[in-house]
Image: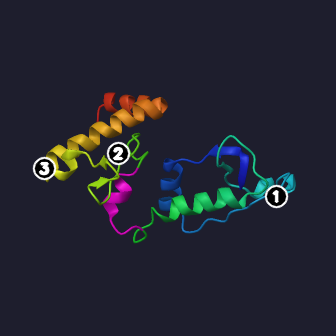
Amino acid sequence: MLTPQGETMSQALFQQLATGYDQIVLICGHYEGVDERVSHLLTREVSLGDFVLTCGEIPALALINGVIRLLPGTVGKVDSVVQDSFQTHLLDYPHYTRPADFRGWPVPEVLLSGNHQAIAQWRQQQQLERTQARRPDLYERWQQAQDRPSL
């Protein structure tokens, strides 16, 4: 059921739902929610965030979109999903399109260099800087994950 009282949506939740279930039934309340007498039918309550909306359809759409894009065949390049924000506790690096200079705003030179190793290093550095500046909580989780020994 979509409710402000549930666990907050996350990439980890989307991954769990995408791989752990054959089907998902969503219950969306309106205004005051859903009659409490159906609560025994629920297996999970999920929230879009710490705020209240007039209906559960908007959070349901977010959940559906987040889960479906993880299903095989939905996204053309599998690497795109693996490198998404939140997969490794880091935000995505900046993306640029053509032309190389738009109204005096140039694409960083390294991206035009053709040096794939330098580009990968630049992207990693951008992810670290962006996450540390914009989402210190995620950056801290990333640091903690780096400190854990891998299996």
Q: Note whether residue 122 is visible.
A: yes
Q: Secondary structure at mark 1?
A: loop
- Report the residue at 75% width, 51% height from top: 53
Q: Residues within 10 Å of mark 3 (few under 14, many from 20)?
A: few
Q: Nearer the viewer, mark 1 or mark 3?
A: 3
Q: Secondary structure at mark 2?
A: loop
Q: Secondary structure at mark 3?
A: loop
Q: Does the stretch in magenta take in 40?
A: no
Q: Which residue is mark 2?
A: 93
Lower position in the chain sequence, tag 1 or tag 3? 1
Q: Are marks 2 and 1 in contact (CB under 8 Å)?
A: no
Q: Dividing the image into 4 quarters, which one contains the C terminus?
A: top left
Q: Alpha-carbon distance for marks 2 and 1?
A: 38 Å
Magenta-tinted stretch: 75-84
Q: Position of residue 80 (x, y in %)?
A: 35, 58
Q: Dividing the image into 4 quarters, which one contains the N terminus?
A: bottom right
Q: Position of residue 144 (x, y in %)?
A: 38, 29
Q: Alpha-carbon distance for marks 2 and 3?
A: 17 Å
Q: Tell me which amino acid carries mark 2.
A: Tyr
Q: Which residue is mark 1?
A: 30
Instruction: In the displayed orientation, state which residue is furthest to the bottom.
Output: 73
